[in-house]
Amino acid sequence: MKKTEYSPFSVLWREVVKDKLALSSLLLLSLILFIVYGASIVLDQEEIVKVDLLSIYSPPSAEHWLGTDYGGRDILGQLIIGARNSFTIGLAITLLTGLIGLTIGLIAGYFGGVIDNIIMRIIDFILILPFLMLVIVFVAIVPKYNVFTFILIMSAFLWTGKARLIRAKVLAERELDYVSASKTLGTPDWKIIVREILPNLSSIIIVNLTLNLAGNIGIESGLSYLGFGLPESTPSLGTLVSYATNPDVLQNKWWVWLPASVLILVMMLCINFIGQALKRAADARQRLG
Amino acid sequence: MVKFILRRIMMMIPQLFVLSVLIFLLAKAMPGDALTGQLANNPKMDAQTLAEMREKLGLNDPLYVQYTRWIKNLLHGDLGLSYVHQQPVTDLLAGRMWNTILLSLCILVLTYAIAVPLGVISGRWQDSWADKLIVGYSYVSFATPLFIFALIMLFLFGFKLGWFPTGGSVDIQLEEGTFDYYISKLNHLLLPSLSGALISTVGIIQYLRSEIIDTKVKDFVRTARAKGVPEAKIYSRHILRNSFLPIAAFLGYEITGLIGGSVFLESIFSYPGIGQLFLQSIMQRDYSVVTALVMISGLATLIGTLLSDIILSVVDPRIRID
């Protein structure tokens, strides 16, 4: 009975370590996050966003490793702050939508009946909405717009997929004998949901959250690229990429937009590769080890 | 079957209603109304006449009255007046709508043209180097955000190599209707639609691959093989036949993605379609145009999912509810 290593987490972990691509992604991502969060503590944000008219659009040099933008601001510094903001906010949205989706999915799936019906109709409705356009409209008309309203607006749309997934799993799970046994013993519903069903869903939840994290970073930076993402006081990686809307910058000043684009791409690829490995781990037939 | 379609359409009605109420309320929440724009253009207008005109236009009526009027106008194809352009929204939309539909069609055609052969190769020669390459490509394309991919495509093929035009939908000096005009139009479409298509293939490739892998070991395929049917025919007549219709059904679900994608693609390639118009309108606070566009996109998505559900129910009787 000492084999505790078969907990869902150890299975997930073993799969990531077995998969070389996922393991190197994990290492690379950790390295990037370590540098980004470490450096952003040391870096002075005031100093970075200060306009320096003497060094507008200077190419990479010893002083500015990645050159400067139209305001003479250091790109590398903005890259680090932007990556920190994009990742943190992507993570916040993922966790918030995870929490909402999980709660609603569990309730709909476990209780079924009218509650399930109502919840599913609402989810069906939200899924057919033109998501991107509505987010942009909300961002444009919300008064006192800031990072928290942005997170809330995004979360208001993005919880639905998770709720649907969790509901489907719970529907299958609640038919199993251990749930009926618990019910017969008189265990309260909330206890069955939290203590017994939830642990059985943990690997699916982790996989889903990981893949969503990558997606959310992409959506956030995309919206920031269009000018409807993070407010100006919180630069994002997408803000740096958006300088490329100026054809001159896109064509001749690659150091302004290319590093941020590559960084978004690398982060999303790493998270996705980790997520794919986790997904295989959650499905016993596809495991490598 | 007919019963299913009817039920499915009935289900759409409450969705349409809620959608229209939501958009109406959003439109009401947007700052400014139909007269704010005219106020800016006409300095002679004073507060009193403004108030009178508001009354006359019914802007002081209770919300439900305004809503019914809005819906009535909508059903008559009257989408209101653009404050910025001072012309009916319908006129403003007409040309751009075509451009966006054209772009979306090109993306769809290219997506299927790229994804179907790749999916078939990948499933037929499972675990070969080609399969590994294709699966690798589909992972990478799944993780790549559209706007970054499109920017890099524009940078490489538009600016660095100069193979494609870098903006617009057609060369301005060309006359409409000539042969060169259509060639130029196609040339302008190619890079944006290729950028959109190359990274939206993942769903179809993965579906086809796993379908083929599952199907090719089934009994009816073994029977066909035992009868001596040539391998190529086994694929075209027996295996793929089952997979193609569900793939066609993905089409309707793609519409949401296409609308979102058009916002990015059109802004990056400065392509004059409704995505670009949407961004411009929201920046210029031209809210009647914004409202109309959101309503149209919502409607398009609804119809798209309706079509997909119907196609799928033809293919797979199990999902019919009746």
Image (spheres, coloured by chain):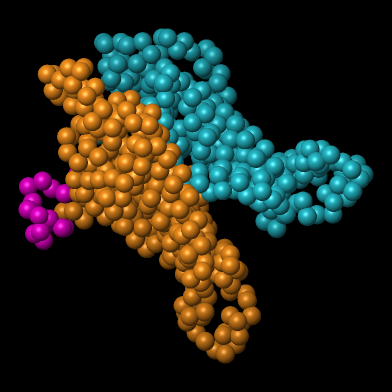
Chain colours: A cyan, B orange
- Above or below, A151 against B118 in this view is above
Secondary structure predominantly adopted by residues drawn in magenta: loop
The total of numbered circles placed on residues is 0
Q: Looking at the picture, how far across and down is residue A99, in whole percent?
A: 64, 34
Image point (39%, 20%), residue name: A232
Residue B177 part of the magenta-drawn span: yes
Residue A125 lies left or right of residue B163; in this view the side is right
Residue B221 seen in this snapshot: yes
Give the quarter of the image for residue B145: top left
Give the quarter of the image for residue A177: bottom right
Give the magenta range: B167-183
Asked whether B76 or B8 is in front, the reply is B76
Q: Looking at the picture, how far across and down is residue A14, in whole percent?
A: 72, 44
Q: Looking at the picture, how far across and down is residue A239, in whole percent?
A: 38, 26
Residue A269 part of the magenta-drawn span: no
Residue A169 seen in this snapshot: no
Image point (33%, 19%), residue name: A68
Asked whether B280 or A84 is in front, the reply is B280
Image point (31%, 15%), residue name: A72
Instruction: Point out the residue furthest to the bottom here.
Output: B227
- Above or below, B37 against B227 in this view is above
Quarter of the picture containing the C terminus of chain B is bottom right
Q: Looking at the picture, how far across and down is residue A272, in whole percent?
A: 55, 43
Image point (52%, 66%), residue name: B4
- Above or below, B190 against B51 in this view is below
